[in-house]
Amino acid sequence: GQPNVNIAVDGPGTGDGFALFCSGETDISDASRAIKDEEAATCAENGIEFTEVQVGIDGIAVMTNPANPVECVTFADIYGLVGPESTGIGTWAEANALSAELGGAGDMPDAELTIFGPGEESGTFDSFIEIVLEDFADERGQEAITRPDYNPSADDNVILQGIQGSDTSFGWVGFAFAANAADVKLLQVDNGESGCIAATPDTIATAEYPIARPLFIYVNNAKYAESAALQAFVDFYLADGLDQAVGEVGYVPLTEDAKSAVRDSVSASLG
């Protein structure tokens, strides 16, 4: 009940959000990855102290069209399909040699490869690279980036439409968005320990499904101290948000122990 509060919400991505937050232009920043050292340094330079609040977990779904016979991929397969050394390849099979070299099965089909995914302004783009591609790229002396020649979009609906429109497509979006999508097939991902794992709320919460990331809000401490509306908003996040809203919008709630740890940490930081 804050009838006189004017809230402006802006996008599109986590990196853009931290730029605004660390220049003091926003009071709170949603983030689909933890703040980077250089972003925290910018906050510090500008005298902005903040509190990190983990609010849930998001898996990143890797998808294809239901017409595609592929059911499961390894990180090596994905690196072979969309990593920095994959520029120019036009079929799934052309990724097999690199995948096999990195420990993958190397048995992907000789089928056209069309790729749809988030653009560089997206937290999903950053997290996908960090989780799936970066270790292989570092090991091979490559820049940790995706191949540049795919179809990027800031709109998850556009990515899904691309997958739906191409029988042997490959793409990735946040699990929350993919979970209820029609006419796409979520690929299982080999976690390197117990084999091919389907993306579900349970496997994401336990980190058994390997392409998963924490979701955060970052709160400007000084703005929090002087704003009853911001305090009420953060209180909502810590109560109903962690318990209900995260699950209702399709993300994966924290375990009860993790929720308690977050609440204790925020209480210690913000009072």
Image: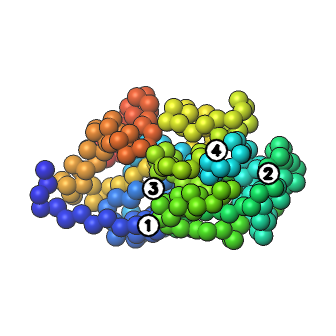
Measuring from the top left, give residue 58's x and y in whole percent: 50, 45
| Circle 1 Cα neighbour tier, 10 Å, few/some/many (<14 / 14–19 / ≥20) | few
Quarter of the rendering occupied by the C terminus: top left
| Amino acid on which the number 2 mark rests in the picture | Pro
| Amino acid on which the number 4 mark rests in the picture | Leu
Q: In 3D space, how far apart are the residues under numbered discs 4 and 3 (Cα atoms)?
A: 25 Å
Residue 142 visible, this angle: no
Tell which of 39 and 140 is nearer to you.
140
Residue 164 visible, this angle: yes
Tell me which residue sits at (27%, 60%) in the image: 223
Asked which quadrant contains residue 26, the reply is: bottom left
Q: Residue 109 carries which label?
A: 2
Asked which quadrant contains residue 159, the reply is: bottom right
Compare marks 3 and 2 and give the one earlier in the sequence: 3
The residue that label 4 is drawn on is 187
Q: In 3D space, how far apart are the residues under numbered discs 4 and 2 (Cα atoms)?
A: 15 Å
The residue that label 1 is drawn on is 12
Side of 132 relative to 159 (left or right): right
| Amino acid on which the number 3 mark rests in the picture | Ala
User: Which is closer to the viewer, label 2 or label 1?
Assistant: 2
Side of 101 relative to 216 (left or right): right
User: Which is closer to the viewer, label 4 or label 3?
Assistant: 4
Mark 2 vs 1: CB contact within 8 A: no
Tell me which residue sits at (60%, 37%) in the image: 198
Secondary structure of the residue carrying tag 3 is strand
Compare marks 4 and 3 and give the one earlier in the sequence: 3
